[in-house]
Image (cartoon, coloured by chain):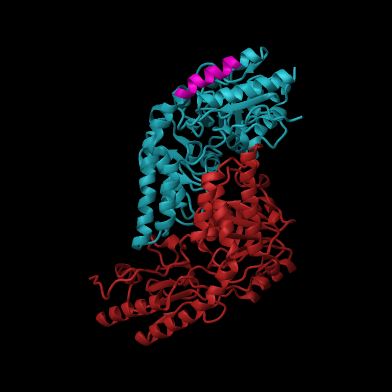
Chain colours: A cyan, B red
Amino acid sequence: MIKRLLSKRNVYFDHNATTHIASPVRSIMNRVMKSYWGNPSSGYAKGKMSAQIIERAREQVAAAIGAHSHEVYFASCATESNNALLKTVSDHFYPEKNKIISTPIEHPSVINTLEYLKGKNITVQYCPVDRAGHIILEELEAMVDDRTFLVCCMLANNEIGTVQDVKKVAAIAKSKGALVFSDCVQALGKIPVNVKELGVDYATFSAHKLYGPKGIGAWYARISSPLIPFLHGGHQEEGMRAGTESIHNIAGFGEACKHINKLVTAAAKNQSQKKIFLSELKTMKEDLIINSPMDNCLTNTINVSFPGIGSGELMKMLDYNGIAVSAGSACSTSLKKPSHVLKAIGLTDEAAQESIRISLGIETKDKDIRYALKVIKQYIEQNK
Amino acid sequence: MIKRLLSKRNVYFDHNATTHIASPVRSIMNRVMKSYWGNPSSGYAKGKMSAQIIERAREQVAAAIGAHSHEVYFASCATESNNALLKTVSDHFYPEKNKIISTPIEHPSVINTLEYLKGKNITVQYCPVDRAGHIILEELEAMVDDRTFLVCCMLANNEIGTVQDVKKVAAIAKSKGALVFSDCVQALGKIPVNVKELGVDYATFSAHKLYGPKGIGAWYARISSPLIPFLHGGHQEEGMRAGTESIHNIAGFGEACKHINKLVTAAAKNQSQKKIFLSELKTMKEDLIINSPMDNCLTNTINVSFPGIGSGELMKMLDYNGIAVSAGSACSTSLKKPSHVLKAIGLTDEAAQESIRISLGIETKDKDIRYALKVIKQYIEQNK
């Protein structure tokens, strides 16, 4: 039975799934859609102006991730970028080298691509992670061999918030002659990201996790790393990604990246909100399981299991009360399988299916937290 | 030497490269960006509203092409759609069947993908076309054999405007047990397109050729045709195209498709403008070569060669006078190679490099035509 428990308030707690589009981002997208719609590949003035918009955005994205602008390539989303890099790099090295080491808590766009590659004779091994989701570096060291061409490790996990020590991962990979790929989608805008400091060869990003538009992503490829086209056709993106550019989406991504420091700073506020949230939840439900790590974790991400309460039921109740949260990754919520991330950190199927993810954002107010806590508390008390 | 010849007027004659975004399209995109940014994969109200926006757009696109909405899949662009279908369908049939028949005048996103597939053991044969670019059906009939799994023929050519008899192409393919793929990007919005009447199994479309946004395309796949994911990850688009949807772009595509009949009707106006343009050009330059066919051609597309005048020089002069035209496909203008399309219809390298494409649109005015004709006339007279 779903009941409205308090005077309703709309609270969006699913910033890891997607964010709203910030007003200055929408502004520039509008301007571009209205005035800069020429084909960037065309030789006349109208086309060249569009090309300039793209190059300015490329510089803005590059600045946000500590790269040179000619190391940044736009694609339609991070999923495309992950598919493109993993598949073409595999094609490049196979059959001389045939092994990728990754982690069992990668995003579905990485995991499912790796599983696809298994069918193409690529050996994929998943390095174990600890109870907090952190990759076990000693295990990684033992796994990387001279047939390994790529180590693939996300910077921040979307479901539980675990931040990996990608710098150390990269050092291990390099010492064995392997390249390093990092899905940085969930990290950018929440923690500082500098691809040079991380020491990775490839990294991927998405605008819609940082108050930019949906339908635009980017990948970083270090200058000397192998790069092979995935989409064939025109010569866009230096021949590396064919297809007429979504100029307004690209401009929106650039604008979102201009505000990256502000976003990262805003995450500090989330830290104290998260602390209050967790301690209050623990008080109202003593057997609460906290799935997000205490250390090296995104400050906005709270993943918890409520023993005895199915996450579907809880989500529905929260939705009815205006509160948007998710069970695991938004990309897999319509599937009934327990989250592969929660399974990998050792949760039972049951505990995994009792988990919800609350992900805060820059506009999250303390009263949003208080409202959600009140709703959850009443629900727990009524269902005791 | 570039000189301004008349009081300048901005004239856009490159609608085959891209179109502006129509005002009602921008309007709905804005509304979506502001209010419907929830992740469509999410189970809560905000996500479901986004999913509804997508499904409405899917119905609008389906209606514009005569398909059922569950046969329409969104992708980031037509290039991605062409890559996805050609590569996955090849993967599906290989090694049992290994041959694709296509035409030598396909768009680069088809030709370059086919060339890539050659390296993956797919036999690709190009059926000859006549001087007007029309596929020679008797040749096609002789080429399709029991190892052929796909016949790939565009509906309308982007460079010269040739409209193919895809219905007959499909009948030939089917009689030999091959599937049919048609790149309909340049046709939609210019001539009526009905995938059922054409009898194709797959077709691809792009919003930015019909006054919709850049960065969104769609493919049609007949219900029983093989369909295999190209991008792996989340379960979006029935598991056939992973990646968070660009909701505003999709909504814009849907809105553009709502006006499809108006667009096709407007093409009638282009027909008389094209006639005037061609006859005046012929008068001012007797040795003008008309590369667009007289019959079965897009009404907006005028491809001509000016013997003795390099297209680069002519384009620059026109651009300086505010007139945007292209030399061949916008996707290949930065390459110095003569157009593969013009070569295929029998032009010499020289004539191919003296050709320009003028593509009219729904907002083209008679005075735009007169202005362009005056500019070209003065230029020709000054360079005699």
Split into 4 quadrants, where in the image is the C terminus of chain A? top right
Compared across the picture, whether A343 is left or right of A73 comes to right
Q: Residue A24, percent across and down?
A: 41, 43
Read off the magenta span. Answer: A269-280
Q: Is residue B186 positioned above or below A321 on the image?
A: below
Taking B196 as reference, is A229 above or below it?
Answer: above
Q: Residue at x 53, y 50 (%)?
A: B31
Image position of A311 with respect to B206: above or below: above
Q: Is residue B194 visible?
A: yes
Question: Which residue occupies the foreground of this view, A213 or A341?
Answer: A213
Q: Position of residue B242 (x, y in %)?
A: 61, 43
As for residue A273 lying within the magenta part, the answer is yes
Residue drawn at (62%, 56%) of the image: B219
Q: In the image, is B354 to the left or to the right of A149?
A: left
Q: As drawn, which residue projects farthest toward the right?
A: A1
Q: Which residue: 25% across, 80% down?
A: B382
Q: Is residue A299 left or right of residue B151?
A: left
Q: Is residue B79 above or below residue A149?
A: below
Q: Main secondary structure of the magenta part?
A: helix
Q: Is residue A305 visible to the viewer in this orientation of the structure? A: no
* Quadrant of residue B225 within the rendered picture: bottom right
Expressed as whole percent of the image width and height from the top left, the position of residue B358 reads 43, 72
Image quarter hosting the N terminus of chain A = top right
